[in-house]
Image (tube, grey):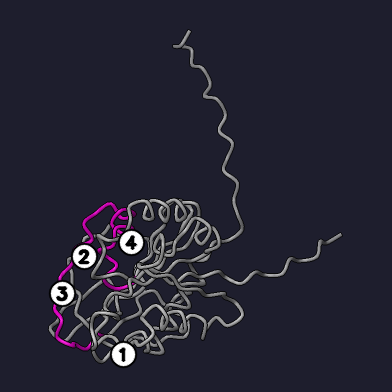
Amino acid sequence: MPQPSQPIRPIRVTVWGENVHEHRDESVRAIYPDGMHTTIAEGIAEHLGDGAVVRTATLDQPEHGLTEQVLAETDVLTWWGHAAHEAVSDEVVARVRARVLAGMGLLVLHSAHFSKIFIDLMGSTCSLGWRNDADRELVWTVAPGHPITAGVPSPIDIPEQEMYSEYFDIPAPEELVFISSFTGGEVFRSGCTFRRGNGRIFYFSPGDQEYPVYHHPHVRRVLANAVGWAAPGPAIDAPTVANRPRGWFEG
């Protein structure tokens, strides 16, 4: 006899923001008066609706807002940082890393390529080329049909943005979803997926604090799609490892 299906639980999303520029820089506060983390959270909620429960956390909160309990109640964590990477506690980084390996999804945004957590998970410098000239960025889809690209045009046209360029010192992505081009001829792998342990990771580069990128409707759609892609599936029990058979040479 078929068993009744279980209701689908909303994806539990924690949007983490450094929230330093918004307090320090009037130009950033004018674009994001409630903080970039709030705008990012609103964009995710706007597209996922009842399919997600979205909370925010910031650097200045106790344990950066990422306590054991908060992370235990998080299916997907988004991370934006820039001015205060070194202020992030190593203990919290280790805590986030453990949760990613256990299956929590992680979205790493813009200058968070230099965050402790991303460098740790990538095992590389994560360095890149850049210039900040309010350049036009075109974000080209190179994996059509990937769930993260659903409902977004190719290219996404971002009128003003900080330029990022190759070489981007990361391991080869599992999937390359987006490549960006800029007016100086530069290109950049701007949308990359990785897996670490049971966790899915998506790096997405558009989102400098000086420009209203997280108000852009197609950028908001990408982030919402990525949350859905990164959310863990049903729990998988670890395999049972039997004792290694003894070989003839062991007597």
Q: Do the residues labelled 2 and 3 touch (CB within 8 Å)?
A: no
Which of marks 4 and 3 precedes in the sequence?
3
Q: Point out residue 30 in the picture as x, y percentages from the top left corner.
A: 29, 91
Task: Give the Cα distance between marks 4 and 2.
Answer: 11 Å
User: From which residue to which does the magenta span run?
Assistant: 109-137
What kind of element bears circle 2?
loop
Q: Which mark is first along the chain, 1 or 2?
A: 1
Mark 1 lies on a secondary structure that is helix
Which residue in the structure is indicated by mark 2? 168
| Amino acid type, residue under disc 4 in the picture | Pro
* Residue type at tag 1: Ile
Name the amino acid, label 2: Phe
Camera-side mark, 4 or 1: 1
Q: Nearer the viewer, residue 122 or 84?
A: 84
Gap between marks 4 and 1 measured at Cα = 32 Å
Q: Which of 151 and 96 is in front in this view?
A: 96
Type of residue at label 3? Trp
- Residue 107 in the image: x percent, y percent? 40, 68
Can residue 114 be found in the magenta stretch? yes
Q: What residue is pinned by disc 3?
A: 130
- Label disc, if present, on residue 31 of the rendered structure: 1
What is the C-alpha distance between the residues marked 2 and 3? 10 Å
Relative placement, left or right, of 164 versus 18 is left
- At mark 3, the secondary structure is strand
Classify mark 4: helix, strand or loop: loop
Looking at marks 4 and 2 on the same chain, the residue that comes earlier in the sequence is marked by: 2
Between marks 2 and 3 in the image, the one whose residue lies nearer the viewer: 3
Q: Which of marks 4 and 2 is in front?
A: 2
Number of numbered markers: 4
Which image quarter is the N terminus in? bottom right
CA neighbours of label 4 inside 10 A, class few (<14), some (14 to 19), many (20+): some
